[in-house]
Every structure is written in structure tokens, then in C-alpha cells.
């Protein structure tokens, strides 16, 4: 499941949020009940592409609490989360924040991609979902899940279904496919069942995913 984040830029609610809630509630009573239990919150993006991707690298494969603590130390060490600021920091300084050597390498490579404009926010915003995923997964340390989180939270694309997200799969098992272990729903026939459950959420599978996360953790996720 996606991790929490604070940043300097103001959060913005997607313009499609209200119509998406109405359509999803009408199409899926189970999801509609979850939506009604969370009436005053919505997905938010902080808007900065480098910040979002750097935070996702820091948080990979560790708990939310650990990720938040390391992220705070990285931000303090860098002064600001920008490509030049990260590139200026010694690897030993970043390691001292709690990052693994591999994550230090990933962060520095990400900074280089932004510094030389091989990746830029405006360009990503003009791409299709598939092209964004292909472009981002060329960067070391960024896999499909991270690229999908970027699509959902930063670009606010409305119809992303992150099939490799444990939180989503766990929530679908809990609400729609009881008796199925999350691991069994992430491959083969189980994966097909998840896709089938989600078919009625098109074209707002990002919104459905966000509310299913809320059913497990009421604290809103922000990148």
C-alpha cells in the first residue's frame, strides 16, 4: 500500500473526484458503502514529480513508520528535495540518513535524470499511462508499482489498477473474495479474479483503489 508524505506544495483534489464517487457508488454497492464511510477526504497530489519519485524510492520495502523517519532525515540533510540538492550530497551523508547503498544509487540516478532533463514533469504529463510507465521504469530503482503510484498521485490519472499493490489486493480479498490469501490474488487465476472485480470501476479504478486503501487505513495517502 502507498505510504504517506508531506511536502511544501498545496494538495489538489482531482477534478473528476465527485462524479467518480457517484458512478462507483451506483455501480458497486460494496464500494459505495466504503465511500460513504469516508465522506470528507479525497486523494491529493503535491505536484512535484522529483519529490514524488524520490519519496517512493526511500519508502520501498520498508514500513511506513521507517520510511517517514528516513525521509525526514534525507530532507534535513539535503535542505530541499531537488535534483541539484540530492546530487550535491555525498553518498556517505545519504547513507547516514538510513538509506541502503542501493537506494542511495537510485536517488542519485533519479536526480541525474531530472538534472539533464531526460525526465521532466511537463513531458510526463503529456504521455499516455503506458508511456509514462515505460519511461519511468527505465530509471534505476523504479518498477511498475512505483510508476503506477506516480500515475495515480502525481499525474492524477483516473483509471489505474495497481495489481501488484498488496494493500489493494488485501482489500479486494477482504471485501469481495473472502478466503483468498493476498498472495494467491497476485498471480494466475487469482489475478484474473481481481481484474474481473475491478471491471465495474472503469473508468475510475484509481479512485476505487484509493477508497479500498481507506478501508484498511483511514489516514489519507499523499505523495
Image (tube, helix red, strand yellow):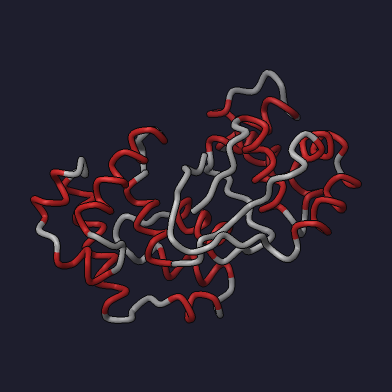
Measured as percent of width and height from the top left, residue 13 is found at 66, 60
Left or right side of 131 for 106: left
Count numbered badges in the picture: 0
Left or right side of 117 for 189: right
Question: Which quadrant would residue 11 be assigned to in this image?
Answer: bottom right
Say if 207 sits above or below 166 in the image. below
192 or 149, nearer to the observer: 149
- Extreme residue in the top direction: 179
Measured as percent of width and height from the top left, residue 192 is found at 67, 41
Left or right side of 198 for 69: left
Residue plotted at (73% across, 66% down): 15
Residue plotted at (31% across, 38% down): 69
Left or right side of 162 for 64: left
Measured as percent of width and height from the top left, residue 209 is found at 66, 45
7 or 23, nearer to the observer: 7
Say if 117 sits above or below 40 in the image. below
- Extreme residue in the right direction: 26
Measured as percent of width and height from the top left, residue 161 is found at 63, 51
159 or 65, nearer to the observer: 65
Residue plotted at (52% across, 43% down): 164
50 or 11, nearer to the observer: 11
Amino acid at each position: 500500500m502507498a505510504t504517506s508524505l508531506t511536502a511544501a506544495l498545496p494538495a489538489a483534489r482531482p477534478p473528476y473526484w465527485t462524479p467518480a464517487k457517484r458512478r462507483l457508488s451506483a455501480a458497486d454497492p460494496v464500494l459505495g458503502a466504503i465511500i460513504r464511510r469516508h465522506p470528507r477526504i479525497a486523494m491529493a497530489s503535491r505536484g512535484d514529480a522529483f519529490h514524488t519519485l524520490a519519496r517512493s524510492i526511500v519508502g520501498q520495502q520498508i514500513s511506513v513508520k521507517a520510511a517517514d523517519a528516513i525521509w525526514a532525515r534525507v530532507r534535513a540533510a539535503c535542505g530541499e528535495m531537488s535534483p541539484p540538492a540530492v546530487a550535491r550530497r555525498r553518498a556517505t551523508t545519504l547513507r547516514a540518513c538510513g538509506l541502503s547503498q542501493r537506494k542511495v544509487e537510485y536517488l542519485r540516478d533519479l536526480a541525474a535524470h531530472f538534472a539533464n532533463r531526460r525526465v521532466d514533469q511537463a513531458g510526463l504529463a503529456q504521455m499516455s499511462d503506458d508511456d509514462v510507465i515505460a519511461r519511468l521504469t527505465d530509471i534505476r530503482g523504479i518498477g511498475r508499482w512505483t510508476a503506477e503510484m506516480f500515475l495515480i498521485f502525481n499525474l492524477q490519472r483516473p483509471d489505474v489498477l495497481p495489481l501488484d499493490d498488496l494493500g489493494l489486493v488485501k482489500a479486494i480479498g477482504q471485501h469481495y473474495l473472502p478466503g483468498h490469501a493476498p498472495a494467491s490474488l497476485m498471480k494466475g487465476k487469482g489475478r484474473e479474479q481481481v481484474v474481473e472485480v475491478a471491471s465495474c470501476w472503469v473508468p475510475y479504478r484509481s479512485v476505487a483503489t484509493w477508497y479500498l486503501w481507506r478501508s484498511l487505513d483511514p489516514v489519507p495517502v499523499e505523495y
